[in-house]
Image (tube, rainbow, N blue to C red):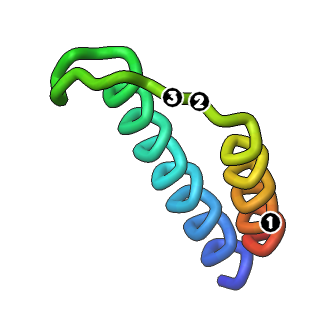
């Protein structure tokens, strides 16, 4: 039973992460939303990656 709950949580986590990736792809690569100047700041990218890795580590 415990293993089944763990597998379900992992599946849901992967699904949620996939939804987030699809959302970012749509925002970045398509013209569905209003076009704007895209600004990429390296420090914000690193902060987001660090936060994402900490959340992923907490899920394990």
Residue at 45 percent across and 46 percent down: it is: 20
Quarter of the picture containing the N terminus is bottom right
Depth check, mark 1 against mark 2: the one in front is 2
Nearest the viewer among 57 and 45 is: 45
For mark 3, what is the residue?
39
Residue 11 horizontal/vertical position (percent) = 56, 56
Above-or-below relation of 40 to 16:
above
Please tell me the numbered disc located at residue 54: 1
- The reply, left or right, for residue 20 in relation to residue 14 is left
Residue at 56 percent across and 67 percent down: it is: 8
Which quadrant would residue 13 be assigned to in this image? bottom right
Nearest the viewer among 12 and 50 is: 50
For mark 2, what is the residue?
40
Badge 1 density bin: few <14, some 14–19, many ≥20, Cα 10 Å: few
Nearest the viewer among 4 and 34 is: 34
Q: CA distance from mark 1 to mark 3?
A: 25 Å
Residue 12 horizontal/vertical position (percent) = 51, 61
Residue 19 horizontal/vertical position (percent) = 41, 44
Q: CA distance from mark 1 to mark 2?
A: 22 Å
Please tell me the numbered disc located at residue 33: none
Badge 2 density bin: few <14, some 14–19, many ≥20, Cα 10 Å: few
Do labels 2 and 3 touch, CB within 8 Å?
A: yes
Nearest the viewer among 33 and 2 is: 33
Nearer the N terminus, badge 1 or badge 2? 2
Residue 54 horizontal/vertical position (percent) = 80, 66
Residue situated furthest top in the rendering: 30
Residue at 70 percent across and 56 percent down: it is: 52
Nearer the N terminus, badge 1 or badge 3? 3
Above-or-below relation of 4 to 43:
below
Q: Look at the numbered disc 3 and give the secondary structure of its residue.
A: loop
Q: CA distance from mark 2 to mark 3?
A: 4 Å
């Amino acid at each position: 039973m415990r293993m089944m709950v763990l597998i379900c949580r992992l599946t849901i986590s992967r699904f949620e992460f996939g939804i987030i990736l699809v959302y970012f792809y749509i925002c970045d690569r398509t013209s569905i939303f209003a076009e704007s100047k895209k600004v990429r700041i390296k420090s914000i990218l690193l902060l987001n990656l660090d936060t994402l890795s900490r959340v992923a580590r907490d899920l394990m």
